[in-house]
Image: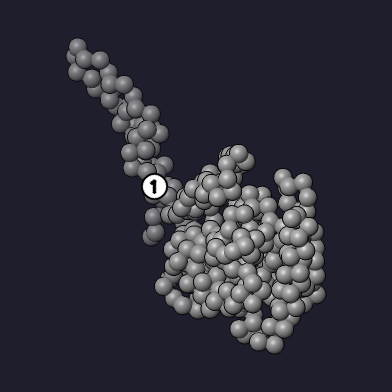
């Protein structure tokens, strides 16, 4: 017959009560009776093992504790934000990624490019867009006379970031696998969104280019296919900024690798960006 743990505990408790009662009547002459021990305390000596729980990832401090200081340079403010994010474990992505890909480029950039998330190569280097899609992005930037690296004049030096800063994997149990990339989920982007918004508030770019459907749909809060809104200008409002930022969605470089026919659309979008950027620079000089 199978034992019933609940009945066994009840029998144990009853036996302990009887033992305590007997100890009160069997004291030696001249000795005080031993203090009775609460049953709950004796049971705690041999507790029933709890059901194991999944280990929780260590959480970082909430973003509202980050104190930005606008008296500092943008480079210093970005560095302070990166330090605040730390070895982030605020969502499950932090448990499997190798390192964060915070962002790269000009702290005073006029143009901010936003992708969806780091992949295999980015996870190892800690920088957005360094794999095959990133190499194509660099060629696209060069064709538009822009760069992720310092260049003269400085307004052609851009900044690149992602919706999430950790590598979303199909199989997070093995971060050594190639072809293990996936788009971030809405929940993962929501956790990381405050950090991206903080970056945008610090950078205050004139233009944002969303690279791909994941970033474009999330930032515009739409379920439409990217083909419906790609190449159109939008006003993007960010809490804490007094004026909207000009926002241009286009296809992700990885989509161009899969479907080269999309390159002509991206080229049209980049020509529009270049014209708008040059016009903005002229108006401020």
Say which quadrant the N terminus sits in. Answer: bottom left
> Number of marks in the image?
1
Horizontal and vertical percent position of residue 180: 50, 75
What is the secondary structure assignment of the residue under circle 1? loop
Task: Judge by depth and name the residue closer to the eye, 41 or 212.
Answer: 212
Horizontal and vertical percent position of residue 116: 62, 67
User: Callout 1 environment at 10 Å: few (<14), some (14 to 19), or many (20+)?
Assistant: few
Going by the picture, which residue comes out furthest to the front? 285
Relative to residue 85, is residue 188 drawn left or right?
A: right
Q: Taking the image as drawn, is residue 60 in sight?
A: no
Horizontal and vertical percent position of residue 119: 52, 71
The residue positioned 62% from the left and 54% from the top of the image is 108
Say which quadrant the C terminus sits in. Answer: bottom right
The residue positioned 50% from the left and 64% from the top of the image is 127
Relative to residue 151, is residue 268 drawn left or right?
A: right
Q: Taking the image as drawn, is residue 26 in sight?
A: yes
Relative to 212, residue 85 above or below: above
Q: Which residue is mark 1?
A: 48
Task: Judge by depth and name the residue closer to the eye, 166 or 121.
Answer: 121
The residue positioned 80% from the left and 70% from the top of the image is 232
Horizontal and vertical percent position of residue 68: 60, 41
Tell me, what colour scheme is on the image?
A: one colour
The residue positioned 65% from the left and 60% from the top of the image is 155
């Amino acid at each position: 017959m199978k034992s019933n743990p609940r009945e066994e505990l009840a029998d144990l408790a009853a036996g302990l009560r009887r033992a305590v009662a007997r100890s009160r009547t069997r004291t030696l002459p001249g000795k005080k009776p031993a203090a009775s021990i609460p049953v709950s305390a004796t049971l705690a000596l041999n507790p029933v093992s709890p059901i194991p729980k999944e280990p929780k990832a260590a959480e970082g401090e909430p973003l509202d504790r980050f104190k930005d200081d606008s008296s500092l340079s943008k480079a210093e403010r970005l560095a302070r934000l990166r330090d605040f994010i730390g070895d982030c474990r605020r969502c499950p992505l932090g448990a499997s990624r190798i390192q964060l890909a915070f962002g790269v480029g000009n702290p005073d950039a006029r143009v901010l490019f936003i992708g969806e998330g780091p992949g295999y190569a980015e996870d190892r280097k800690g920088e957005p867009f360094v794999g095959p899609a990133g190499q194509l992005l660099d060629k696209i930037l060069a064709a538009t006379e822009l760069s992720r690296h310092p260049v003269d004049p400085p307004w052609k030096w851009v900044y690149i970031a992602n919706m999430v800063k950790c590598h979303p994997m199909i199989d997070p149990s093995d971060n050594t696998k190639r072809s293990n990339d996936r788009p971030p989920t809405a929940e993962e982007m929501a956790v990381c969104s405050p950090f991206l918004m903080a970056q945008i508030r610090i950078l205050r770019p004139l233009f944002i280019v969303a690279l791909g459907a994941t970033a474009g749909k999330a930032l515009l809060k739409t379920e439409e296919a990217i083909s419906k809104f790609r190449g159109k200008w939008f006003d993007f409002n960010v809490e804490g900024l007094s004026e909207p930022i000009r926002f241009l969605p286009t296809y992700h470089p990885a989509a161009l690798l899969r479907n080269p026919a999309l390159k002509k659309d991206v080229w049209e979008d980049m020509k529009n960006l270049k014209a708008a950027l040059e016009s903005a620079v002229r108006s401020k000089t």
